[in-house]
């Protein structure tokens, strides 16, 4: 049993790559697998904080700045207040099917626009699941890439956000005052 567990852990962590880097808003961490992006942190005060927020898997990852060069550049541009797209491959293998569905819909919300939790629930054909959508958002491992900050309560209030409501407001304001 322990051997099977160890093999499973090795397959989950094999080939992981990461980087931490600085932007105008703070330090960001990125963790990826051969399949795509696994995790990104919101801006932090230090590289060490960003590194820790990537979770235990980062301890088995190789630092790979060249692999993430393009994404780092696009995130720096985004955080400096410019419109940016993130068509990157994602590794959502650690998510439930419902989370993947919610995140795929959320990824389609245009830059500078917002939608409600109810709207997302309707898009995934579960119109009464707005609260479950909120739960899926709270587990989003790829903020900005999957722009959960663009999802609000039906009354326009911010709702929750893993990075805190101040960060959510800041991201929405950043996108509203876009420099193209």
Image (spheres, rainbow, N blue to C red):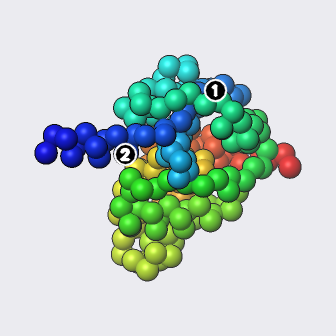
Q: Residues within 10 Å of mark 1 (few under 14, many from 20)?
A: some
State the image coordinates of residue 90 (x, y, percent, origin top left). Answer: 55, 54
The residue identified by callout 2 is: 11
Q: Residue at x 40, y 40 (%)?
A: 13
Q: Which mark is residue 91?
A: none
**Rendered view: 35 above or below 82:** below
Viewer-closest of 35 and 122: 35
State the image coordinates of residue 151 (x, y, percent, origin top left). Answer: 54, 58
**Among the 4 quarters of the image, the one containing residue 150:** bottom right
Q: Is residue 27 visible?
A: yes
Quadrant placement of the N terminus: top left
Q: Residues within 10 Å of mark 2 (few under 14, many from 20)?
A: few
State the image coordinates of residue 9 (x, y, percent, origin top left). Answer: 31, 41
State the image coordinates of residue 163 (x, y, percent, origin top left). Answer: 49, 39
**Mark nearer the viewer, 2 or 1:** 2
Kindly indicate whether the residue at mark 1 contacts the one at mark 2 (C-beta within 8 angstroms).
no
Q: Is residue 163 visible?
A: no
The residue identified by callout 1 is: 21
**Rendered view: 73 above or below 36:** above
Q: Residue at x 37, y 32 (%)?
A: 56
């Amino acid at each position: 049993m322990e051997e099977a567990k160890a093999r499973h852990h090795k397959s989950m962590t094999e080939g992981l790559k990461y980087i931490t880097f600085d932007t105008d808003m703070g330090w960001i961490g990125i963790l990826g697998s051969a399949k795509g992006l696994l995790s990104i942190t919101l801006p932090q005060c230090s590289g060490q904080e960003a590194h820790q927020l990537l979770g235990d898997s980062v301890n088995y990852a190789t630092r790979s700045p060249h692999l993430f060069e393009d994404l780092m550049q696009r995130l720096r541009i985004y955080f400096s207040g410019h419109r940016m797209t993130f068509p990157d491959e994602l590794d959502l293998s650690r998510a439930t099917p419902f989370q993947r569905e919610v995140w795929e819909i959320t990824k389609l919300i245009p830059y500078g626009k917002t939608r409600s939790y109810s709207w997302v629930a309707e898009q995934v054909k579960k119109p009464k699941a707005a609260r479950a959508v909120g739960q899926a958002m709270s587990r989003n491992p790829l903020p900005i890439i999957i722009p959960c900050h663009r999802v609000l309560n039906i009354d326009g209030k911010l709702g929750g956000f893993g990075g805190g409501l101040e960060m959510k407001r800041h991201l929405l304001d950043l996108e509203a005052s876009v420099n193209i």
